Image (cartoon, grey):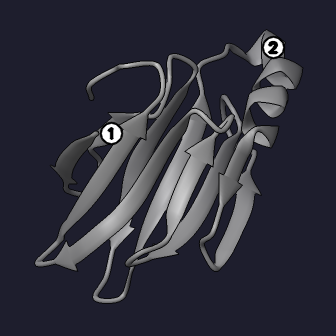
Amino acid sequence: MSIVSRKCGEQVQLSDDISVTVLAIDCSEVKLGICSFTNKRRKSYANEHLQCVHTTCSGFYYFPLGGSITLVVHCEMGKSVSYNDTSTLTVLKIAEGIATLRLVSGCGRTP
């Protein structure tokens, strides 16, 4: 388990295949962009990875513009995003343009 703080534009690795970027922070929620590491020719592979992402957050949508497909989620404090039941990212605190996140990774990676 790791506790990390991220500003807008900064990333956290959720797994070898999935990265999470903080897209926006406001007083009550964090907008996270979840992206699979694939190239344009492997969009179906990216879709398979993103189908393994589960969230307790209130809203989410896919953003297919440009390169790889991104899953965008709006997370309030206490809500989480998990990948393949092995890694979980939970929003612990939102304050002054910084999101504090708890990363629990079953594969033993440190962000």
Quadrant in the rendering for residue 34: top right
Q: Position of residue 77 (x, y in %)?
A: 37, 78
Choose the circle earlier in sequence order: 2 or 1: 1
On the picture, is 36 further left or further right than 40? left
In front of the other: 65 or 96: 96
Q: In the image, is residue 20 above or below residue 93? A: above
Query: Which numbered disc covers residue 75?
Result: none
Using a 10 Å C-alpha cutoff, classify the residue at mark 2 as few (fewer than 14 neighbours), some (14 to 19) or many (20 or more): few
Q: In the image, is residue 45 above or below residue 87? A: above
- Which secondary structure lies at badge 1? strand
- Inspect the image, locate mark 1, and give the three-letter code of the amino acid beneath it: Gln
- Inspect the image, locate mark 2, and give the three-letter code of the amino acid beneath it: Arg
- Farthest residue to the left: give it: 96
Q: Position of residue 29 (x, y in %)?
A: 40, 80
Identify the residue shown where x is 46% and y is 66%: 31
- Which secondary structure lies at badge 2? helix
Q: In the image, is residue 90 above or below residue 89? A: below
Q: Position of residue 50 (x, y in %)?
A: 74, 38
Assign the N terminus to one quadrant of the image.
top left
User: Which residue matches tag 2?
Assistant: 42
Quadrant in the rendering for residue 81: bottom right
- Farthest residue to the right: give it: 44
In front of the other: 34 or 67: 34
Say whether marks 2 and 1 touch (CB < 8 Å).
Answer: no
On the picture, is 33 further left or further right than 4? right
Quadrant in the rendering for residue 22: bottom left
Identify the residue shown where x is 34% and y is 37%: 12
Query: Which numbered disc covers residue 11?
Result: 1
Assign the C terminus to one quadrant of the image.
top left
Q: Position of residue 97 (x, y in %)?
A: 17, 72
